[in-house]
């Protein structure tokens, strides 16, 4: 898994560095960047390892890159009260103080639905607002949470940065209002 993780991350960041997405970043066209990456990288990424694991690595890397460029505060791969959190927006301090103003992104790295539901149940222990736990996966599951499916074309994942920015702006966390929505 370590070698696959590095190979996927290296491939993703090499692609991003060589692509024309820097122009899209400056124009705040994050959905276009995600669509471009998925269309051009999806097949290679899923060929590297198990599909869900590979897509989880791709989603994590891409979200880290885009959240940084969108100037959206986040913490990645953290632990809170003994529970692993993939991405928390804006941070653990806010989660502890006011869960309503905090978004948790759960990036699915397995196709075992029992494990996925157990993981979501764990997240409810630290984030009681179910609508503030979003799932990112390579396929759609019958769960009550908002889910972003990573697909090569017409991926709902393309909208995630816009939706995160809307959440942050509605919660009053964005002091700069970089993403005007």
Image: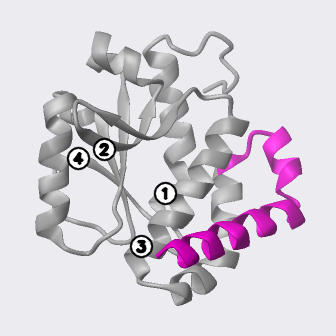
Work out whether residue 2 or residue 98 is closer to the camera in this orientation and state it.
2
Q: Would you name the residue on which mark 4 appears? A: 145
- Label 2, label 1: how many angstroms apart (C-alpha)? 22 Å
Asked whether disc 3 touches disc 2, contact meaning CB atoms under 8 Å apart, the reply is no
Q: Would you name the residue on which mark 2 appears? A: 84
Give the mark nearer the N terminus: 4 vs 2.
2
Give the answer, above or below, for where 152 lies relative to 76: below
In the rendered structure, the answer to whether residue 45 lies left or right of residue 176 reads left
Residue at 37 percent of width and 31 percent of height: 103
Give the mark nearer the N terminus: 3 vs 4.
3
- Label 4, label 2: how many angstroms apart (C-alpha)? 18 Å
Give the mark nearer the N terminus: 3 vs 2.
3
Residue 169 place in picture, x, y as percent: 52, 19
Residue 159 place in picture, x, y as percent: 52, 49
Q: Would you name the residue on which mark 3 appears? A: 53
- Label 1, label 3: how many angstroms apart (C-alpha)? 16 Å
Magenta: predominant secondary structure element? helix
- Label 1, label 4: how many angstroms apart (C-alpha)? 14 Å
Residue 73 place in picture, x, y as percent: 57, 26
Judged from the image, the secondary structure of the residue bearing numbered disc 4 is loop
| Circle 1 crowding by C-alpha within 10 Å: few under 14, some 14–19, many from 20 | many
Quarter of the rendering occupied by the C terminus: top right
Q: Which residues are magenta?
A: 1-30
Give the mark nearer the N terminus: 1 vs 4.
4
In the rendered structure, the answer to whether residue 164 lies left or right of residue 39 reads left
The circle drawn on residue 157 is: 1
- Label 3, label 4: how many angstroms apart (C-alpha)? 20 Å
Give the answer, above or below, for where 63 lies relative to 129: below
- Label 3, label 2: how many angstroms apart (C-alpha)? 16 Å
């Amino acid at each position: 898994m370590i070698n696959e993780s590095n190979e996927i991350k290296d491939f993703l960041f090499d692609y991003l560095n060589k692509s024309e997405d820097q122009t899209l970043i400056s124009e705040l066209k994050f959905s276009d960047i995600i669509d471009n990456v998925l269309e051009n990288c999806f097949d290679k990424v899923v060929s590297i390892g198990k599909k869900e694991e590979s897509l989880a690595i791709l989603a994590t890397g891409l979200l880290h890159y885009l959240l940084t460029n969108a100037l959206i505060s986040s913490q990645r791969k953290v632990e809170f009260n003994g529970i692993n959190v993939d991405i928390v927006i804006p941070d653990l301090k806010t989660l502890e103080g006011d869960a309503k103003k905090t978004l948790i992104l759960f990036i699915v790295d397995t196709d075992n639905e029992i494990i996925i539901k157990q993981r979501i149940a764990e997240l409810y222990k630290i984030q009681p607002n179910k609508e503030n736990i979003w799932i990112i996966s390579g396929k759609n599951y019958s769960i009550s949470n908002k889910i972003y499916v990573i697909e090569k074309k017409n991926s709902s994942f393309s909208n995630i940065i816009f939706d995160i920015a809307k959440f942050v702006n509605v919660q009053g966390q964005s002091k700069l209002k970089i993403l005007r929505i």
